[in-house]
Amino acid sequence: MRTVFATLVLVLAAAAPLIAQQDPLSSARELYASARYDEALATLDSLRVSEDVSVKPGEVRAVEQVRSLCLLALGRASEAEEAIGAVVAVDPFFQPGEAEAAPRVRAAFQEVRRRMLPDIASERYATAKASYDRRDYAAAVEQFRQVMALLDDPDMQGRLPDLRTLSSGFLELSDAAIKAAEAAKPAEPVAPPPPVPAAPKVYTSEDPGVTPPATIRQDVPKVPITILNMARDKGVIEILIDELGRVESAAIRVSLHPTYDSMLLSAAADWRYRAATVDGRPVKFLKRIQISITRRD
């Protein structure tokens, strides 16, 4: 068992953010690799109590990962769960992949995530709602999107459906409030004030007389194998195509998986089309694309 854990910590050491050599976190990793688990734990504890050492927010996950590995190696499962819980609390979307962790560690992470995700989603919903109530709509949009991503996570197991309805509604309201505020901003005074051109109409497949855009390049990224079994079968991305056939903006309407959603949005920026037309004139077009995941048997 120690051989498996020692191999795992080497993977974690390569992937974790680099900090100064011989700092407590690096020393703890070396002690763990040498099977000196109690000493490694004592070194990690110094990160909490030393006045001269502080843990950056981005390093909390790495510290608690090593702590959970040491505790698991010592058979202290309940304490290991607390360390895993600290990782999940900092980054609820993190899950160690097959290449990063042994099955026992992945199973422990999944069990803790399944237990914690409903409470984390509820807390983040409360934070998002507070932002909405004080009319900080930009923050509310981002926070409600995170809540939606948590609720769509497979480890949520379909729980909190009412919270998803509320989050979706407040997300739309926040987005609408931002657009309304932007539309209400007065133009800068000039003499004489220039005429304000009307915003170009955005067409959809439901508008009569519009010829939809033709695809030139629409490369959909492959789903990483580490999240394949956690992703939903189908998702929807919505893109706004401008008069030159470029993707002006993109948004996930039905999430497949938070990690893959980000990959899909990045890929969409490079997609190209022959622009939609009305009476031969190029126009903006809002296109919805369904993404289906094929799994091998």
Image (tube, helix red, strand yellow):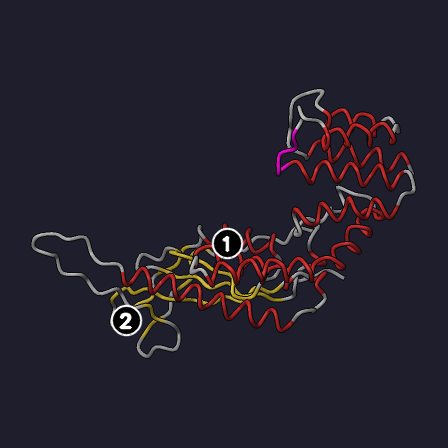
Amino acid type assigned to the residue bearing label 2 in the image: Val
Front residue (pair 264, 115) = 115
Task: Give the number of the disc on residue 265.
Answer: 1
Coordinates of residue 54 in the picture (x, y in percent): 65, 30
Q: Residue at x 26, y 59 (%)?
A: 185
Question: Which portion, as a residue range, is magenta?
Answer: 54-58
Q: Which residue is mark 2?
A: 278
Q: Is residue 268 left or right of residue 210?
A: right
Question: What's the residue type where badge 1 is placed?
Answer: Leu
* Residue 3 screen position, x and y as percent: 89, 34
* Main secondary structure type of the part rendered in magenta: loop
Please, is residue 89 above or below residue 276 in the view?
above
Helix, strand or loop for disc 2 = strand
Whether residue 57 sits left or right of residue 157 in the image: it is left
Question: Quadrant of the image for the C terminus?
Answer: bottom right
Q: Which residue is found at the position 29% from the left and 65% from the top?
A: 283
Q: Find out whether residue 55 is within the magenta segment.
A: yes
Q: Quadrant of the N terminus?
A: top right
